[in-house]
Amino acid sequence: MRSSLISTRSTPVYHAARLSEYAGGAQIYLKREDLNHTGAHKLNHCMGEALLARHMGKKKLIAETGAGQHGVALATAAACFGLECEIHMGEVDIVKEAPNVSRMKLLGASVVPVTFGLRTLKEAVDSAFQAYLADYRNSIYCIGSVVGPHPFPLMVRDFQHVVGVEAREQFREMTGTDPHAVCACVGGGSNAMGIFSGFLDTAARLYGVEPLGRGDGTGNHAATMSYGREGIIHGFKCYLLQDEEGNPAPVYSCASGLDYPGVGPEHSFLKDEGRVRYVTADDRQAMDAFHRLCRLEGIIPALESAHAVSYAIELARERRHDAILVNLSGRGDKDLDYVLEQYGAGDG
């Protein structure tokens, strides 16, 4: 099992021909990280973190999760390498992402409900850090994104770099050139940092798509780059959504993996340098893209990834001769109950 998980890492780049035709302009390609074992890009850094734990002689993996994909991937890695696993998850997300909670438990992880604050991702990080500090000799904190104090952002970025390396090689093999644009959703920013790192030295325009949720009012979104300012959260400096006193502001997104008030420090740097443009998609736009990809390509995306697909469709209509690569960072089986209950099966 260990060798198969590691040796079959490569995921394809897929030309979404019918989605491209629907957009009526540029050609859209998908980096199919949703086809990874456990259904998302998260396994890339979770396997690395579990190997690091083994090397350090640690017995237990502790982590937070929002959408549950990081939790499932880490529980898988823990099972693979014979380690204990403890996942902290907000009560709100436990309800929204029930299939992933069941997967974590089946894989042997202990799921700790977080009952304070907004009971979502930010509080799950708080809770996981507290648990790690109480048992740091025996455990390792396996953070789920390119956030936190050094070396976490660097470590997760390097483990996710494989996505960008693969995507660039595959896209060139398919088309003979680099894409004109690369799109990825951004919450903490691990999948985006992974794919962007393979294209930073190219002419490709890079777009990080944040969740605008229900609108631009405080508490209605988690668009950190668009509405945040410099601040400190969980031991690192970044753009941060804050209240008047400088505390992390309440956030919201239909996608549990994106509702975090901060963002990776390297993303903050890339924004300041002008290398990456950070844009938004709201719940309605993300949900429309979710249903379009289902009906036109037979692919059910994660709600997080649907934000990136949404912006790619918009971009394709504006730049009709471009080739656009989207990091489809996760699959949407975890979101099915929530989508059907809140939005239905689409317009057909």
Image: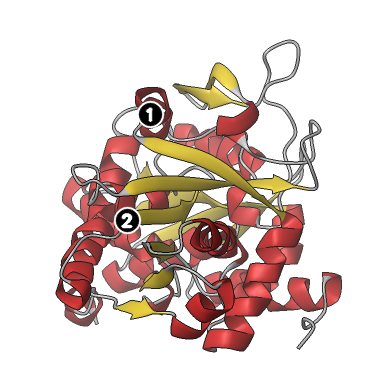
Residue 96 % position (x, y): 73, 65
Task: Name the kind of residue labelled 1 in the image.
Answer: Gly
Please identify the quadrant where the N terminus is shown: bottom left
In the shown orientation, is residue 320 left or right of residue 167?
right
Q: CA distance from mark 2 to mark 1?
A: 16 Å
The image quadrant that residue 155 belongs to is: top left
Q: Measured along the vertical axis of the image, is residue 227 above or below residue 39?
A: above
Label 2 CA crowd tier, 10 Å (few <14, some 14–19, many 20+)? some
- Percent x, y of residue 62: 45, 49
The single residue placed furthest to the top in the displayed view is 245
Q: Identify the residue under disc 1.
A: 274
| Lateral position of residue 164 relative to residue 261, left or right | left
Question: Mark on residue 180?
Answer: 2
Whether residue 120 is visible, yes or no, is: no
Q: Nearer the viewer, residue 189 or 118?
A: 189
Residue type marked 2: His
